[in-house]
Image (cartoon, rainbow, N blue to C red):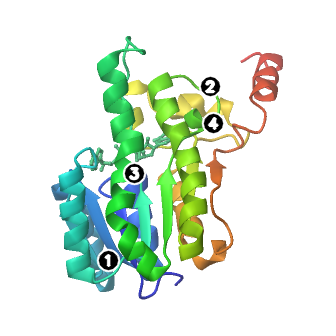
Amino acid sequence: MRFDDRVAVVSGGANGIGWATVERLLDEGARVAILDLETDAAAAKLAARASDHDTTLHRAEVFACDVTRAASVDEAVASVIERFGRIDVLAAVAGGDRLTDDELGEEHWTSIVDWNLHGPVRLIRACREALTASRGAIVMVGSVNGVAAYGEPAYASAKAGLTLLAKNLAVTFGPAGVRVNVVAPGTIRTRVWDTQGGPDRLAPLYPLGRVGEPADIAAAIAFLASDDASWITGVTLPVDGGSLAGPFAVMSHLLDAGE
Ligand SMILES: NC(=O)c1ccc[n+]([C@@H]2O[C@H](COP(=O)([O-])OP(=O)(O)OC[C@H]3O[C@@H](n4cnc5c(N)ncnc54)[C@H](O)[C@@H]3O)[C@@H](O)[C@H]2O)c1
């Protein structure tokens, strides 16, 4: 119960990695504010969970929020503070990619960077005072795309930006006791792969022989947000089944195996 009496804000908490993070933090005692566009989906998941875990329902609440709009983020965070009185953890999960043939297109870059890099900045700005008061922790969700060339340059650049955002804020927020880290997932089984033939076709690229589950990322987020990581700040932690360990070696192995 690492999060007893703590309040966590999870953007993108209605689905996928965000929802797994919400469940993990609830299981470990937190009160959780879900900030998402899909408020109905979040409410339905909480209601479904309540039948089995009725003690957790009163510890979670859903707030409408669009991380691409500063006013929406400010309003949602103000409501969280009004409702819960404090913020100890910010998990900035909301983000994603839109596949395009025009990978250097002006509109594509503006929207992808705004969503994946500026979105977390808006959340941090809104939560900063509360996190300073609690000596809290920030965990942002990047991607292996932000660490090496896996394609999709706009998305990759935005996710890579989170690494330097975390390093810089680790230095400036450190004296106030606020830690800032990033997790960089590989392929994770969420709905984003539904239109791309499912995630499992990529399993051979992972030395551990499978793609990741949302709970794999939630565990890493919970670790970095917890006191177990109290001397860790400014890092980007790959959670990737070994994909980044040696991409050339992985490909050589597959070629030798005739795949
Ligand atoms: N699934 C993967 O393979 C994978 C791999 C690496 C990184 N990621 C990253 O993990 C994060 C979550 O991805 P996922 O696969 O769980 O996606 P998902 O679509 O399952 O969940 C994303 C959630 O974020 C919410 N959201 C999207 N835009 C929002 C906005 N503007 N404001 C507020 N909420 C918004 C959605 O409503 C949804 O609930 C993203 O940042 C993504 O880039 C995913």
Q: Indicate the secondary structure of the residue bearing disc 3.
A: helix
Residue type for callout 1? Asp
* As drawn, 11 above or below 55: above
Name the residue that disc number 2 marks: 149
Q: Which residue is mark 3?
A: 120
Given residues 173 and 86, the one toward you in this image is 173
Say which residue appears at 63% left-offset and 36% top-offset: 147
Residue 224 position, x and y percent, is 59, 66
Percent of width and height locating residue 196: 41, 25
Q: Amino acid at mark 4?
A: Val
Judge the density around disc 1: few (<14), some (14-19), many (≥20) Cα neighbours within 10 Å.
Answer: few
Mark found first going from the N terminus, 2 or 3: 3
Q: CA distance from mark 4 to mark 3?
A: 18 Å
3 to the left or right of 7: right
Amino acid type for the residue under numbered disc 3 = Pro
Q: Choose mark 2 or mark 1, whichever is in front.
A: 2
Q: SS for tag 2? A: loop
Q: Are marks 2 and 3 in contact (CB under 8 Å)?
A: no
Q: Which mark is residue 247?
A: none
Work out whether residue 85 or residue 10 is closer to the camera in this orientation and state it.
85
Rounded to the nearest whole Å, what is the CA distance between mark 2 and mark 1?
A: 43 Å
Q: Kindly identify which residue carries mark 1.
A: 52
Disc 2 from disc 3: Cα separation: 22 Å
Residue at x 53% of width, y 66% of height: 173
Q: Nearer the viewer, mark 4 or mark 3?
A: 3
Answer with mark 4 or mark 1, whichever residue precedes in sequence: 1
**Label 1 vs label 3: CA separation?**
33 Å
In this image, 158 relative to 174: left or right? left
Going from the N terminus, do you reach mark 2 or mark 1 first? Answer: 1
Give residue 147's mark.
4
